[in-house]
Amino acid sequence: MHTALNKTLAALPNDTKVYPGHEYTKQNVKFLTTVLRTEPVNKLQSFAENNEQTQGKFTIGDEKVGFKDRASYGSKADQVKEYNVFMRLNDPTVQKATGKTEPVDVMGALREMKNSM
């Protein structure tokens, strides 16, 4: 997971469109907000709370890049980096929440925390 997100996806150009094959926005927001509170996270939370259906609708900026039948993470790579806690392993707030500082350890702790919700 660390390699896929923080080496492969993170290395793509920021304007790369990202379309994961599953939809867990509402569940992910519940976990995300226990770890990180930033403006992009707050926007995602508001979006999830105010939309019964979240598939293919969320984008931080003005440009809608998702397809109607795809996951709400139909955003550009730079946007995903802003609100995907698993891509913010060096963020001091995330490290504090996990009690870890090494990226792989932070990832493992986040995964355990999410699994226990």
Image (cartoon, grey):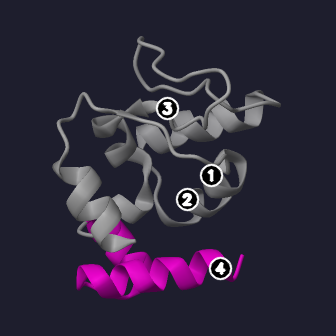
At which x and y percent is residue 116? 69, 83
> Secondary structure of the magenta portion, mostly?
helix
Q: Which mark is residue 74?
A: 3
Q: Which residue position is annotated with label 1?
A: 29
Q: Which residue position is annotated with label 4?
A: 115
Q: Amino acid at mark 3?
A: Gly
Dividing the image into 4 quarters, which one contains the N terminus?
bottom left
Of badges 3 and 4, nearer the viewer stands: 3
Q: Amino acid at mark 1?
A: Val
At x 31%, y 38%, the residue is 77
Q: Which mark is residue 96?
A: none
Q: Are marks 2 and 3 in contact (CB under 8 Å)?
A: no
Label 1 environment density (alpha carbons within 10 Å; few <14, some 14–19, many ≥20): many
Give the extent of the magenta segment: 91-117
Label 4 environment density (alpha carbons within 10 Å; few <14, some 14–19, many ≥20): few
At which x and y percent is residue 55? 68, 32
- Between the C-alphas of marks 3 and 4, the distance is 24 Å
Q: Secondary structure at mark 1?
A: helix
Q: Amino acid at mark 4?
A: Asn
In primary-sequence order, the first of circles 4 and 2 is 2
Q: Secondary structure at mark 3?
A: loop
* Magenta stretch: includes residue 44: no
